[in-house]
């Protein structure tokens, strides 16, 4: 493979404003209920009183993670697609959908741990983030990157992203990266919980 594109999400900067969601939705003219990028909020904890001193202490936490297709090294969608409509493009590693081959069966949506594939109920075809390949062809960033007011999203060749951000951390509520080997780097906030943490609640997945 000549190169591999991927995303960096700086969860320490993300404020949950959902501008990336809106910009993506607008650019792709998506209807209500279909998003190629969504912002998850993971929160939990509470207040507890110290029996000895009577003082109240908190272990509350909350942070946001922006999620889309991660153009994985071992994409589950490609493996389960019965018509081979899903494929990983050799020249840049993007995982794309051949609409002519897609039958809208939804197997990819069931297999993807990130919820990336979305059904176009009118065309009866599966759709998802293609990293704004039309913009990439013009030398532009995906629209989510340029729209983020906190500059919490970066996109580029993984080799270059790794030079700037060497730690490939994954945090709750994201799935275990060993499942699909996503091309995703995450800069964790101070109070981030590890993958698999069950002490928090996820909000925003169904927007």
Image (cartoon, rainbow, N blue to C red):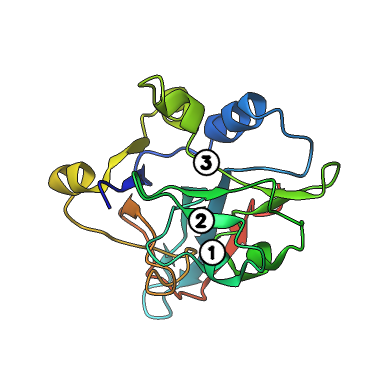
Left or right position of 1 against 136: left
Residue at the image position 62 percent from the left and 56 percent from the top? 85
Q: Judging from the image, what secondary structure is the residue with disc 2 in?
A: strand
The residue indicated by pointer 1 is: 78
Q: Is residue 113 visible?
A: no
Mark drawn on residue 130: 3
Q: CA distance from mark 3 to mark 1?
A: 14 Å
Residue 95: image location, x then y, percent: 48, 51
Q: Judging from the image, what secondary structure is the residue with disc 1 in?
A: helix
Mark closest to the chain's N terminus, 1 or 2: 1
The residue indicated by pointer 2 is: 87
Give the camera-side residue of 140 and 89.
89
Label 1 neighbourhood size at 10 Å, few (<14), some (14-19), many (20+)? many
Mark drawn on residue 127: none
Tags 1 and 2 in contact by the CB under 8 Å rule? yes
Label 2 neighbourhood size at 10 Å, few (<14), some (14-19), many (20+)? some
Mark closest to the chain's N terminus, 3 or 1: 1
Q: Judging from the image, what secondary structure is the residue with disc 3 in?
A: loop
From the viewer's perspective, is the residue at label 3 or at label 1 nearer?
1
């Amino acid at each position: 493979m000549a190169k591999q594109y991927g995303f960096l999400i700086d969860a320490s900067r993300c404020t949950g404003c959902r501008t990336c969601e809106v910009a993506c939705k607008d650019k792709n003219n998506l209807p209500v209920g279909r998003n190629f990028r969504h912002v998850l909020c993971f929160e939990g904890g509470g207040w507890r009183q110290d029996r000895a001193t009577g003082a109240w202490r908190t272990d509350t936490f909350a942070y946001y993670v922006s999620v889309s297709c991660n153009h994985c090294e071992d994409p589950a969608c490609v493996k389960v697609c019965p018509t081979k409509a899903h494929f990983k493009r050799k020249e840049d590693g993007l995982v794309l959908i051949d609409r002519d081959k897609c039958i809208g069966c939804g197997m990819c949506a069931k297999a993807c741990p990130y919820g990336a594939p979305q059904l176009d109920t009118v065309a009866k075809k599966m759709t998802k983030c293609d990293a704004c390949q039309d913009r990439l062809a013009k030398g532009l960033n995906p629209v989510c990157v340029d729209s983020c007011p906190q500059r919490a999203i970066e996109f580029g060749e993984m080799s270059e992203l790794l030079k700037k951000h060497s730690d490939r951390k994954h945090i709750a509520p994201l799935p275990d990266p060993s499942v699909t080997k996503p091309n995703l780097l995450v800069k964790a906030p101070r109070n981030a919980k590890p993958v698999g943490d069950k002490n928090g609640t996820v909000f925003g997945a169904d927007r």
